[in-house]
Image (spheres, rainbow, N blue to C red):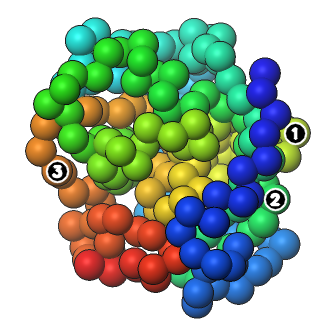
Amino acid sequence: MDDTDVTDLYEEFGDDRLPPGQRETSEFPVLSKSGTPDWGLETWEFTVTGAVETELSFSWDDFRALPSATQTQDFHCVTGWSRFDCEFTGVPFPELAERAGVRDDAVHVMFSALDGYTTDLPLADCLRDDVLFTWGLDGSALPADHGGPLRVVTPHKYAYKGAKWVDGVEFCTDPQRGYWERRGYSSTANPWEEERYS
């Protein structure tokens, strides 16, 4: 298992580790669309669909058996706070993309979640090793209120791009809009450009 510090990725996007308009906190506030959903290990399923050569479906045990990585990342919430040095453990996005065989006409990715939440990103923004489907936080299981059993983390984007309780990804041939994006939030969500709203 890899163990990598990616907190210097801000150098791709700006001069400061703390994006403009953010304040650093050691807390980890809980925000969600509609509260923590119920789920069960026996019925949990993760799917990879859309513009791929092979659609995939994983049980919880199957997903946990995939190659994983542990990374130290920073976490930036669109509401104005950032938490540095979070340790996340999970499956890098490119691992799933490679297994599914993403078609050449795929340009966008839609993430879905157990609570009905959706969020989208251009495919190029997802094909990074630091985009993780994570089940671990700071050496423990990811708490349910932070998206456990599984959430996406996107350290180069505001955190609403990282769906909590994620249960699937769809590779799309046209840009789609997720829950907050349809309500005026930015589709690109670059914290160093303060792309909070479209």
Amino acid on which disc 1 is placed: Gly
Amino acid on which disc 3 is placed: Pro
Q: Which mark is residue 85?
A: 2
Q: Which mark is residue 139?
A: 1
Q: Secondary structure at mark 2?
A: strand
Residue 175 vs residue 44, the one in the foreground: 175
* Image position of 78 (left or right of 89): left
Q: Is residue 52 visible?
A: yes
In whole angstroms, how far apart are the C-alphas of marks 1 and 2? 12 Å
In the rendered image, which quarter contains the N terminus? top right
* Quadrant hosting residue 61: top right
Q: Secondary structure at mark 3?
A: loop
Of labels 1 and 2, earlier in sequence is: 2
Amino acid on which disc 2 is placed: Asp
Residue that badge 3 annotates: 175
In whole angstroms, how far apart are the C-alphas of marks 3 and 1? 36 Å
